[in-house]
């Protein structure tokens, strides 16, 4: 009968439904990748706008978690042939990971650069980092370096495959 308790309960249910939907979608994408049936529909896109839209999606989440989320754009940017939704998914997976592993008071910095005819996007955070022994494995399906944080262990594997399908490279560094 308490409206606040009901509202909180509904918020929790909606959040969990979104999380489960995302997990199912990632599993389906990974299945498509494994079977060679992942479809890529390239069109001319502004990669900085794609990254910016993902940063916008996460600004409120970062604020609630007391994490500084900043985005630095190049003065000019190149258009690229890419599947907008798939590239957006890559940045969702990576920025979500950065926020998951960064504690309150930390920073997540997203930067885009024009570099030798390519666009380079870096996402850095002040999170716990990835142990050297795990760094070579975190792009493998279902591999989780840190089991204390939510997630399925397929986000980076899916991101890596999408980037490869666009003739790009996904590099991970950690100290």
Image: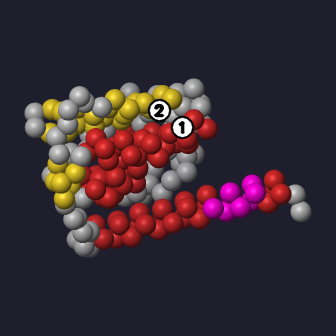
Residue 113 image-quadrant placement: top left
Left/right of residue 66 with respect to residue 77 in the rendered view:
right
- Which residue: 54% across, 31% down? 67
Secondary structure under tag 1 reads helix
Instruction: Tell whether 56 sits left or right of 116.
Output: right
Q: Residue furthest front?
A: 76
Magenta span of residues: 7-14
* Residue highlighted by disc 1: 62
* Callout 1 crowding tier (Cα within 10 Å): few <14, some 14–19, many ≥20: many
Query: Where does the image place residue 19, in percent across and percent down from the top left?
Result: 55, 60
Residue closer to the observer: 153 or 168: 168
Compared to residue 169, the image places residue 9 above or below, namely: below
Q: Which residue is mark 2?
A: 69
Q: State the predominant SS element of the stretch in magenta.
A: helix
Dot 2: element: strand
Q: Is residue 140 visible?
A: no
- In magenta stretch: residue 48: no
């Amino acid at each position: 009968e308490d409206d606040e308790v009901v509202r909180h309960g509904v918020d929790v249910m909606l959040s969990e439904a979104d999380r489960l939907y995302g997990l199912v979608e990632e599993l389906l994408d990974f299945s498509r990748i494994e079977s060679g049936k992942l479809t890529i529909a390239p069109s001319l896109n502004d990669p900085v706008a794609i990254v910016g839209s993902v940063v916008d999606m996460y600004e409120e989440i970062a604020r609630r978690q007391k994490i500084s989320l900043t985005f630095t754009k190049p003065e000019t940017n190149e258009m690229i042939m890419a599947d907008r939704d798939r590239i957006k998914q890559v940045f969702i997976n990576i920025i979500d990971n950065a926020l998951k592993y960064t504690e309150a008071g930390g920073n997540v910095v997203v930067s885009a650069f024009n570099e030798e005819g390519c666009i380079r996007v870096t996402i850095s955070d002040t999170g716990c980092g990835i142990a050297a022994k795990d760094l070579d494995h975190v792009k493998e399906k279902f591999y989780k370096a840190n089991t204390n944080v939510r997630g399925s262990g397929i986000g980076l594997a899916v991101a890596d495959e999408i980037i490869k399908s666009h003739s790009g490279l996904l590099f991970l560094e950690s100290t």
